[in-house]
Image: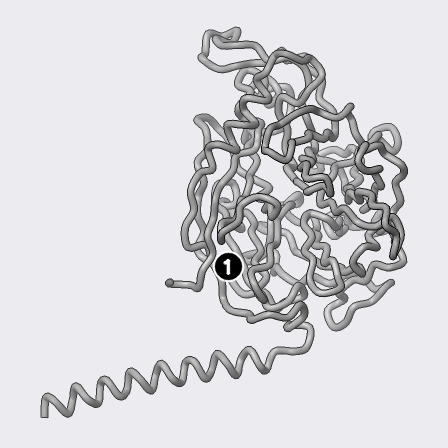
Amino acid sequence: MAGDARARRRTGTGLGVLLALVSAAVLLTALPDHDREGGGTCAAREVRSWSADAPLTNAFARYGDDAGRTDDWTGGDGTHSVRLPDGRLLWLFSDTFLGPVFAPPNPVGESYAWRDASTPLVRNAGVVMAADGTLESTLPAPLFPDPAPQQWRWPVAARAEPRSPGSAEQVLRVLLWTRTAGSAPWIYGVPAATEVATLSLPGLRLEGISTVLDQRSVADASRRVLFGTTAVDAGGWTYVFGGDDGRAVGRPASKAYVARVPRGRLGEPGAWEYWDGGAWTVRGRPAPVLGNGRTTGVGSAFTVVRDGGTYVLFTMAAGAAGLTAVTSYWACAPAGPWRGPARSFSPALPPGEVAAYNPQAHPALGGDGRLVLSYDVNWLDATGGAAQTNLSRNVSLYRPRFLSLRLGAPGS
């Protein structure tokens, strides 16, 4: 009798596993067509392990602390990177401090490297890393001029692509977020438009800027969508993700959106198509692909990578955890449906009232199954003069930190 019971338990377990596998296969094969874009095998993914990438974090700390120049990068956020055809890596930053950094102690006796509180801050900057990983120079800043008084541009995702379809000459396309100064809750500016800048190669000289999607006619500024927080190439398309500013008006999470552009045509506004909830359309209103504004959704900036046939999105978690914890979602296609959130993890933060934000993947780095992810750090209350005072008395608070991640099946 005991042997029969054990046999029944073993048989039941085997049948359960078989049914689960069959159900999963049916689920994947039953997905709508847009769910399988990009090809490859799609399977659930989450972060299986992570650790601090001290060498890369320290490289930016050394470069920022180097007092040999007075016009270079000493700190910034909005960390994005793009590999150039000659092997260099261009790092793009949003708000950036320039100028000298002084050795500790700081003026109040703390053991931090520091900068003068009057140090200039520019709205964007570019830092060039040599092919061997050495940070070499800061491009003249700001790299992208303000479009008008009380307006500025933040650079986000970028791609090297042909100057025109079929051309042998390459240029760099950089997506830009245009924002306008505003009062609370718009302390980081009111979203205005998505633009694309063209830079020459290899000289990285700005040639021109064109508007892709103007959002100023959308009355509710919290529902304006800016594209370019991240981009993923798959098949013949570049998928460009964006988000709204729901968090600015107190929602626990913002919503994610996606557009697509034929590979090599980022600089052509008429080539962009937006997911409207049922199809790709040139002129339709973008519809969210992720986020209910409460328990699921994204931070104001997030990143997406492709692991085989699976798309994995990293973002700060919804709610209060979004100040410290990174979570992820996965999908079989850019338009979803997105599944998650997966379990979150909390990267290290320096002492003080600080917050983590803007997780960004850097596919040009890593390798052998390792994914490099950066996150930015800022003083928790980023308003008023107190914030700049704290960032200046400890320059390490406003520099990217880096992680090495490995993805795998849930529970593996």
Which amino acid, by three-letter code, is at mark 1?
Pro
Q: Where is residue 376 in the image (x, y as percent from the top left)?
A: 57, 35
Residue 343 placement, left or right of 225 = left
Residue at image location 48% in from the left, 32% down from the top: 55
Residue 98 versus residue 10 in the image, above or below: above
Q: 145 or 277: which is nearer to us? A: 145
In the figure, 229 relative to 337: above or below? above
Q: Mark 1 points at which residue?
A: 341
Res. 95 image quadrant: top right
* Label 1 residue SS: loop
Q: In this view, does 1 lie above or below 380?
A: below
Residue at screen point 23% across, 84% down = 10
Q: Which colour scheme is used?
A: one colour
- Between 286 and 71, the one lying in front of the other is 71
- Direction left: furthest residue: 1
Q: Which quadrant holds the N terminus?
A: bottom left
Q: In this orientation, which residue lies closer to the viewer: 330 or 235?
A: 235
Name the side, left or right, on which 33 lies relative to 354.
right
- Quarter of the C terminus within the rendering: bottom left
Rendered residue at 79%/68% (across/down): 280
Establish if 240 lies above or below 356.
below
Snapshot quadrant of residue 177: top right
Where is residue 107 drawn, in percent x and y? 52, 6
- The residue carrying pointer 1 sits among few (fewer than 14), some (14 to 19) or many (20 or more) residues within 10 Å by Cα, namely many
At 53% from the left edge and 18% from the top edge, which residue is drawn? Answer: 394
Residue 183 percent coordinates (x, y): 74, 33
Spot occupied by residue 125 in the image (x, y as percentages of width and height): 73, 29
User: Closest to the observer: 57 or 93?
Assistant: 57
Number of numbered callouts drawn: 1
Q: Is residue 108 left or right of residue 228?
A: left
